[in-house]
Amino acid sequence: MDDAALLMRLAALNTAYASVIDTNRLEEWPDFFTEDGFYRITSASNHARGMQAGIVYADSRDMLHDRVFALRRANIYEAQTYRHVVGMPQVLGRDADGVIRAEAPFLVVRTMRDGTMSLFAAGRYLDRLVEREGRLLFAAREAICDSPNFDTLLAIPL
Amino acid sequence: MDDAALLMRLAALNTAYASVIDTNRLEEWPDFFTEDGFYRITSASNHARGMQAGIVYADSRDMLHDRVFALRRANIYEAQTYRHVVGMPQVLGRDADGVIRAEAPFLVVRTMRDGTMSLFAAGRYLDRLVEREGRLLFAAREAICDSPNFDTLLAIPL
Amino acid sequence: MDDAALLMRLAALNTAYASVIDTNRLEEWPDFFTEDGFYRITSASNHARGMQAGIVYADSRDMLHDRVFALRRANIYEAQTYRHVVGMPQVLGRDADGVIRAEAPFLVVRTMRDGTMSLFAAGRYLDRLVEREGRLLFAAREAICDSPNFDTLLAIPL
């Protein structure tokens, strides 16, 4: 697979990923990860200091399913909508074990039920991807937000 | 045409489409549609309820030309500028008659003459495309906005 | 090199360019330009009137290095972060001398140290690119902002 083809696959994956969040198909979100997939939302300053904690943290697909279940029970999605726009990704490298390391910038706009829009998050995804049965899956995805402040509703996936 | 090639064509089409709006070359906008092309701007909640009405509605290229004429007469573009950033599209499917169904997220920032910038719209395009003489044209484009509230100036194409 | 391949290279270049600014690797920024590369930040209205002046202006890679040095001395990056999202580029044409003319829309969000985010800039890049030893370099890059008002901190590259 050459570079341009890989970039297109990563870009398409990012679009599909954002689409399940933005169109309220959250139940499909964990399927973008490997079974022992790692996911966290953190801030650039926490990331730079190597801090392990994150606002949201999961290290398996099951934990992601649990989170979706909790979000559904809390009716979080009733009150607001998200819209991701993800820039073209960069391939940072490929490890010996076939893992692809990649990065992509993102902006997220939140729209409240009353129509109010606001910039909700800006940052970059830092990813480790593997190929399984012809599909790219996230072995790890970190959403690194530029802002250190997080809305208390940030339980919603980025 | 393979998937990656189609995605690139759709992405290029979305960029060209946004460019005629953002650089005030509105007269070229109807040419992105088929002669009986359908266009509307609606909200996610209207779309979800299957409501036919839209804030802006047209079902032919002639109606789009009429709209451009009206916008020019009202000097709408004298006072403001739009900037679309459209994310990588997704191909949703291909119908038996060759119609391509696709989707892409968008953000639009509006800049007033005094320099004030604001988030104007966030949402997604839902498209039906056909190939005519080597060009992709919109048989239908819906701009589905996340917010149910529309600025009264929304006569401007998204 | 066919059109789709060129578009992908331009998109990847724009991502890499934005990444050095957004992740505070400013020292790499001048390397995206030819030795006598031209760079300026201007407004759409100045650009339309053919005005030569820009908010930021440089006509060599050395001048860009000087600017980075000045920014470092002023500690501009201590207080804020930028996040570019650049849309898919358009190829506007190729000149007889091999120069590629291209354009791409951009949005930039600024995040202050206290976490406040704001729309910082919206506009488009207007570029002239050349190939040198297998790499695309900017012979000229203009960041044309939709807003005529510039923050006094705009010494930071767009």
Image (cartoon, coloured by chain):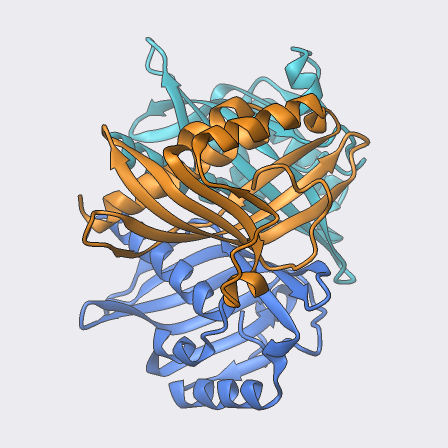
Chain colours: A cyan, B blue, C orange
Q: Is residue A131 left or right of residue C142?
A: left
Tell me where residue A63 appears, x and y as whole percent. 62, 23
Q: Nearer the viewer, residue A22 or A102?
A: A102
The residue located at (62%, 80%) in the rendering is B76
Q: Is residue A118 left or right of residue C85?
A: right
Tell me where residue C82 appears, x and y as whole percent. 63, 36
Q: Quadrant of residue B107?
A: bottom right
The residue located at (36%, 12%) in the rendering is A95
* Above or below, comparing residue A18 to residue B146 in the picture: above
Q: Nearer the viewer, residue C131 or B8?
A: C131
Q: Quadrant of residue A26?
A: top right
Camera sees residue A12: yes
Figure quadrant of the N terminus of chain A: top left
Figure quadrant of the C terminus of chain A: top right
The residue located at (68%, 22%) in the rendering is C73
Tell me where residue C92 appears, x and y as whole percent. 32, 58
Camera sees residue C23: no
